[in-house]
Image: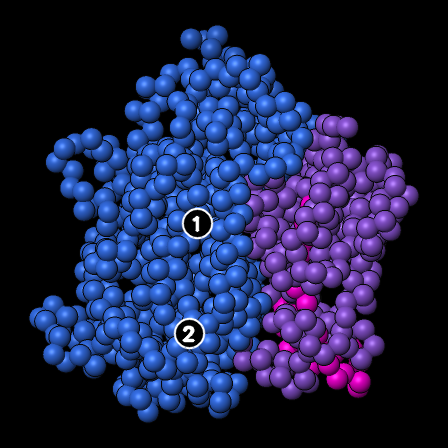
Chain colours: A blue, B purple
Amino acid sequence: MEEDKEALLARAAEERKRLFERYDLGPEQSGIDPWENPQFEVYHCTDKYGFIHDTRLPSNRTAEEERMTRIELERDKKWMKMLNHWNDPKRPNDKLRKRVFKGIPNKVRWLAWKKLLNLEDTMDKNKGVYDRMLEWARKYSTEARQIDSDVNRQFREHTMYRQRYGIKQKSLFNILNAYSVYNPELGYCQGMSGVAGVLLLYMDEEEAFWALNTLMIDKKFEMHGLFVEGFPKLTRLLEHHDRICAKLLRKLQQHFLKHNVDSILYSLKWFFVIFVERVPFSLSLRIWDIYLMDGESVVVAMAFTILWLHRNELLRCKDMDTIIEYLQVKLYKDFGYSDDFVTETLDSTMRNLRRHKLHLPPAPKKNEKPLRPLGQLINEHKMDFNKTVGHRRIDFSENERESFELVKTRQETPAIDVQSTVSCETSEYTTGDAYSMKTYQSFTSLATSPAISTNSLYSNGVLKNQSFEIQYNEDDEYKNDNAAGNKESPRHLTPTKFNISHSHTNYNHDNHNNHNLNNASFSASSTSSSQNNTTTSSHNDSSNFKYKNVIVIKSNGDSEIYSNHTNDNGDESESEKSIENTRL
Amino acid sequence: MTRNYGALETKRFLVTPETKDFPRNNYGMATARGNNGSGQRPNNTTQNRICQFKLVLLGESAVGKSSLVLRFVKGQFHEYQESTIGAAFLTQTLCIDDTTVKFEIWDTAGQERYHSLAPMYYRGAQAAIVVYDIQNQDSFERAKNWVKELQRQATPNIVIALAGNKADLSQSRVVEHDEAKQYAEENGLLFLETSAKTAMNVNDIFLAIAKKLPKVEGNNGNVHGRRLNENEPNRQMNNCCK
């Protein structure tokens, strides 16, 4: 006992001496860890997901962000509880669904994704397989060159992938090579590094390998057909996307056709990497949450949702380059709607598409699935020499020739004369189209300012609530685009509930007959809140809030989507309130 | 003929965590609009026509197609430009004498597997830049195949330029300048060695293409490459989705 005391005292004295000595030596001494000097500007530019930005992120958090953090903390607890009882047969499925749509808290995402993909099971059944594949890959992978060049470019602005040959880069290189050996029919296709790259942000190497495999071959996802030679699933998804647009977004589709904008020109990354780098990263994670739960119907619905939410802006784009730029660049920088609003819209879109029986594309073709068993040892003698030495093939394979021809015919489809088609429109959405045609004409004939078009909205009786002063300031929006660090959901957006209450009010104005009790009581409260918000927002013109959410109801078909939508949100905001109440 | 060029490629992208030059977003908003929208062109005194051309970039993976475009359109260079999936689209405008040439640029994915989607992007193009990496013989052979395919499948009279990129790394050069030049002359191609990194010859190659493109009225009667009168493009640009 006495000895221990002495030793502790000696240690304390030693420590004290050492510390004083270091200060005596001053800043020139050796052995200072780099992090001890505040040179690491990178920490000031890194967002909550690990992406590094050009400029420092603001050090103050907005009230809205703080509110969201508090909500997320509450959700963490609920999620942990739910994850611990994952296999409980009594666990209600709709609760999971609801919570996934609200967004899996970033802290538990790694756990939740593993559960959603059922990785524990898969890995139990395949013990040792990954290591064997990795070993084979070292000997036989024919894709190492391409994978290397892609790993070197994947998410390099993310802290985890920043260091060349760093641990995550190594994992990414390993799993892509191992997978190309495990599933040699698929091999490696550019785009898979994006999928695996996202998975690796939340998983370790072996988990990500099996998650990648699940995404490729599980019936729910079947991305194999997307990436395999000739892209058979891509053409199927595109056709389905076009079919949905023809039915529900006809006017926009005509507009696109008029300007030679084929869906293949804007939607590849939507389908291949599930919207990563086409929408802000925070939003793409939310879509991934839902995708991992529900599978490809999410991709179909989200593709439609993007066009639907932005249809008015897209109709205002008067040539191909502005349309494509809007979809490829603008929406990535700033989606213009809060993540919550988008996932809520996605939810109702999914249900609406299901009603129309359009939620899933037609059944897959034979060549979209691996035909040979996976994970078989490769016969060295049967390997393609050109592939092994990294030569390109000169001829197309049958699959490729098919898609080559298909792509050519897609392009040859003549652009349709939009004016005449629209005027003899016979679809069930005629009312809507007639309305939007008016707006459309007011754009083209009257003016360059969208503000004028809103006058026509008033005169058409679409917007009855005169307190909504709609102004659309082009310059403001651009200022916002240039603002730094836009990967998180934009700060300037007024909370979702505001938008919804507007649309809800409109809806009730236009559809008195459709009231039910629930709606009525909700709308009573939301009307007052919307009036509050209106005053705020007219002050906040310069804060770039976009009013497009306000103009929601335009046709029978569309209001059908959104009548549902508002109901859900009635419930949603109730539950949010309860979260806040418990906190207080 | 085959050479393992993976190592050389990676050297180029070598980045340590201390690198100050943080990545940027890939593409800028202001490109086309900034140059066209407000009619503030460098020599707007004599502006009287605008020609619009579709241009496609083709070539082996990781030779620097996207980097060339980024340099031309935004004047930037990223050491680790993301790999292009499918294709990316950008626009840029050049002024030659009294003509404004607007390029609609389709930057394509280089991996062999995306080859079957290529016609989507080169069909209707009036110009193409076929890119190879001067450190990589395979990519040069691949470029020759692209030229053949373009001459067979694309728009007749398409203006093709051959770009030997990464010219700043000439210490590890494999494809000789003269060899490529001779090939280009035999096939009627424009040819320049470029460096997206140092910006060497990047604007020049686009300018050379713009000069060679026929800027007469009609332009094959195509949707693209049309001549627009002075007022029309302004009205168009100002209206769009801002």
As shown in the figure, which amino acid type bears the numbered disc 2? Asn
Helix, strand or loop at label 1? It is: helix
Q: Are marks 1 and 2 in contact (CB under 8 Å)?
A: no
Q: Residues within 10 Å of mark 1 (few under 14, many from 20)?
A: some
Where residue A352 appears, as percent x and y from the top left, is 24, 60
Q: Residue at x 33, y 60 (%)?
A: A244
As shown in the figure, which amino acid type bears the numbered disc 1? Thr
Left or right: A425 in relation to A523 = right
| Disc nearest the viewer among 1 and 2 | 1
Q: On the same chain: label 1 and label 2? A: yes
Instruction: Identify the disc placed on residue A556.
Output: none
B228 or B183: nearer the eye? B183
A483 or A245: nearer the eye? A245
C-alpha gap between disc 1 and disc 2: 27 Å
Left or right: A567 in relation to A558 = left
Q: On the rendered image, what quadrant is the C terminus of chain A found in?
A: bottom left
Helix, strand or loop at label 2? It is: helix
Q: Chain of mark 1?
A: A
Where residue A402 appears, as percent x and y from the top left, is 49, 44
Q: Chain of mark 2?
A: A
- Residue A373 vertical position relative to residue B204 in the rendered view, above or below: above
Determine if residue A68 is in view: no
Tag 1 residue: A235
Tag 2 residue: A312
* Dot placed on the residue nearer the N-terminal end, 1 or 2: 1
